[in-house]
Image: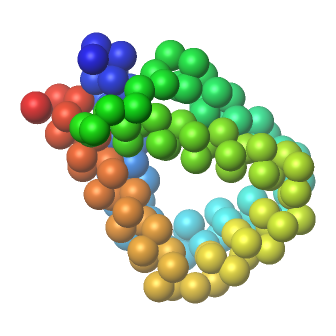
Amino acid sequence: METSIIIARILGPLYVVSAFGWLFNRKVYGDLVEEYVNHRGLLYLSAVLAFLFGATILTIHNVWVADWRVIITLLAMIGLIKGLSILVYPEVSVRLAKAISSNMAAMTGAFSLIFALGVVLTWFGYFA
């Protein structure tokens, strides 16, 4: 349980702050996505980091239980799959990123989910 709390204390605030960052700086975040998809080195670096994030957390926290801790495992799986998919299919990832970033409803939904996950993780990491 201690590992779950430590990871929740790191990821929870990061997700909350990221969601607020997008809420208050939508233009800046749109520009960031544009730069991201146009710089292949940055795309590669983010893929490696996502893969490492997923693999590292799955190595230390592969918990499949019916409570909040499974969220961390699922996020790690998503990171691993995201990194792998960008490394193997970078052009598909670029097209997907452009499609999502140009759709305000999709971006709002994505950052709403990120915010909700951040609140849940912060709650269990610091207050529960």
The answer to which of 6 and 40 lies nearer the viewer is 6
Residue 14 visible (yes or no) = yes
Coloring scheme used: rainbow
The answer to which of 73 and 28 lies nearer the viewer is 73
Residue 50 visible (yes or no) = no
Residue located 58% across and 47% down the image = 78
Residue located 29% across and 57% down the image = 116
Left or right of 44: which side holds 5? Answer: left
Residue located 27% across and 17% down the image = 1
Horizontal and vertical percent position of residue 101: 62, 76
The answer to which of 14 and 99 lies nearer the viewer is 99
Horizontal and vertical percent position of residue 111: 42, 65
Q: In this rendering, is residue 7 above or below 74? A: above
Residue 54 picture quarter: top right
Horizontal and vertical percent position of residue 29: 56, 66
Given the current orientation, which residue lies at the most extreme left position?
Answer: 128
- What is the tally of numbered marks visible in this picture? 0
Left or right of 93: which side holds 13? Answer: left
Residue 77 picture quarter: top right
Horizontal and vertical percent position of residue 84: 77, 44
Q: Give the quadrant of the C terminus.
A: top left
Left or right of 89: which side holds 119? Answer: left
Q: In this rendering, is residue 26 above or below 58? A: below
Residue located 89% across and 65% down the image = 91
